[in-house]
Amino acid sequence: MDKSFLGAMEAITGTIHENKEFLTDLDRAIGDADHGHNMARGFHAVMEKLRASPPADLSTGLKTTAMTLISTVGGASGPLYGTAFLRCAKVMQGKDSIDKTDAVQLLGESLDGIESRGKAQPGDKTMIDALKPAYDTFAAASEQNRTFLECLEEACKAAEEGVNYTKTIAARKGRASYLGERSIGHQDPGATSVMLILKALTEYYKSL
Ligand SMILES: Nc1ncnc2c1ncn2[C@@H]1O[C@H](COP(=O)(O)OP(=O)(O)OP(=O)(O)O)[C@@H](O)[C@H]1O
Ligand SMILES: [Mg+2]
């Protein structure tokens, strides 16, 4: 299989590892102080599995990623990210590389999977507030025939704006919702991990 899938997963794992305490601190402010640790545990387990038995193709690799996240990440984020990666595995069935059209579908299916699993909507202060603007922006940039890299960079910017937007709103899902208005002023940990993952993938793409 193409080495670039393993490289992309390593890039995600690396950024989650580097930001483990940061993500956990964000979750300490409005949740239960485990988002960074949950994500790091999950992605380290993913890398162990992928390294021990390299997947035959992209779709299998994404499916292994999904199942590992679901089984090793406690909390809300494991099943949500797991659902997103499962949808990605479906999109990539029978394909051995990712073009711009695939990327639009990957982001769109991830968003749809997270929305249907978590029943959250834009403005609820969740990972959706980073992922939806990233998807919308990537899709619009792709329509305008921008390069893959330009689409990625614009999507990252949109995700960052989404993260900043989460500081201005009250949480309506997960533990943070117990704080209600007191969650205003804090950025959402899940939206932040979505943004970090997109940025890591963009940097990785630039390095290829
Ligand atoms: N229903 C949901 N839909 C989408 N994202 C959600 C939902 N519930 C929580 N999240 C996201 O999960 C993040 C928290 O993930 P974490 O790994 O800390 O799991 P958790 O502690 O079980 O979460 P929570 O306490 O929010 O249920 C939140 O910042 C938010 O972005
Ligand atoms: Mg938590």
Image: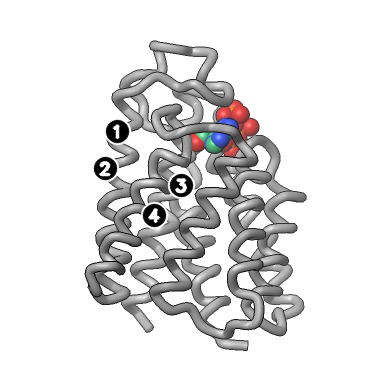
Element type at marker 4? helix
In the rendered image, the vertical position of residue 69 relative to residue 92, given as above or below: above
The C terminus - image quarter: bottom left
* Near-viewer residue (12 or 126): 126
Labels 2 and 1 touching (C-beta < 8 A): yes
Say which element carries label 1. Answer: helix
Q: Nearer the viewer, residue 64 or 109?
A: 109
Residue at position x 42%, y 34% from top?
122
Residue 76 lies left or right of residue 9; in this view the side is right
Q: Position of residue 191 (x, y in %)?
A: 43, 41
Quickly name the residue at label 3.
Answer: 193
The reply to whether the C-beta atoms of the residues labelled 4 and 3 are less than 8 Å apart is: no
Horizontal and vertical percent position of residue 99: 43, 79
Amino acid type of the residue tagged 2 in the rendering = Glu
For the N terminus, which image quadrant?
bottom right
Q: Check disc 3 and give the amino acid type.
A: Ser
In this orientation, does residue 22 appear?
Answer: no
Query: Tag 1: residue type?
Result: Tyr
Name the residue at 76% across, 78% down: 53
Q: Quadrant of residue 35?
A: top right
Query: Could you say which disc has been placed on residue 135 in the image?
Result: 4
Q: CA distance from mark 2 to mark 1?
A: 6 Å
**Residue under pointer 2:** 161
**Which circle's residue, 4 or 1, is located before the other in the chain?**
4
**Of marks 2 and 3, the one in the foreground:** 2
Q: Nearer the viewer, mark 4 or mark 2?
A: 4
Residue, disc 1: 165
